[in-house]
Image (tube, rainbow, N blue to C red):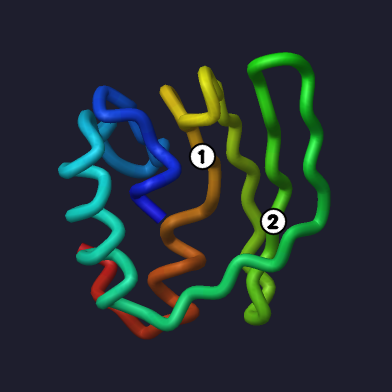
Amino acid sequence: MAEFYDEDAVNHQVTQDPVEGKEAIREMFAREFALADMTCVVENIFEDGQWAILEWKDPLGLRGCSFFHVIDGKIKFQRSYWDKLTFLRMHNLSIH
């Protein structure tokens, strides 16, 4: 998934600090996807010029929304909103 991002991209999952740079984003994905089996089911995609919005859910019922700024076919900036406490509880992960 990191290949969709620009070298200097920023990925900000609002439940944590922003991650800067394609390699750091790749590492974040590897770390996060190792924690739990995650599936994104697309509910809606909206696009307006260089901006896109993805509304998603997962099979367990968690829902979220992500905003993407895309320039020259690469994601330069992403901000995603979802409930981390619900995610941790659904996957029986530590809340601390």
Identify the secondary structure beneath mark 1: strand
Mark 2–mark 1 contact, CB under 8 Å?
A: no
Dot 1 amino acid type:
Ser
Q: Relative to 55, does residue 73 appear above or below in the rendering?
A: above
Name the one closer to the observer, 7 or 48.
7
The label on residue 56 is 2
Dot 2 amino acid type:
Trp
Residue shown at the point (69%, 63%) measured from the top left: 57
Q: Which residue is under mark 1?
A: 80
Residue shown at the point (47%, 30%) measured from the top left: 74
Identify the secondary structure beneath mark 2: strand
Name the one closer to the observer, 34 or 92.
34
Tell me which corner region of the image, top left, top right, bottom left or bottom right, holds residue 36: bottom left
Name the N-terminal-most of marks 2 and 1.
2
Image quarter in which the C terminus is found: bottom left
Q: Position of residue 4 (x, y in %)?
A: 44, 43
How packed mark 1 is, by other alpha carbons closer than 10 Å (few <14, some 14-19, many 20 or more), is some
Residue shown at the point (24%, 52%) measured from the top left: 26
Q: Position of residue 77 (x, y in %)?
A: 44, 25
Q: Relative to 28, does residue 93 appear above or below in the rendering?
A: below
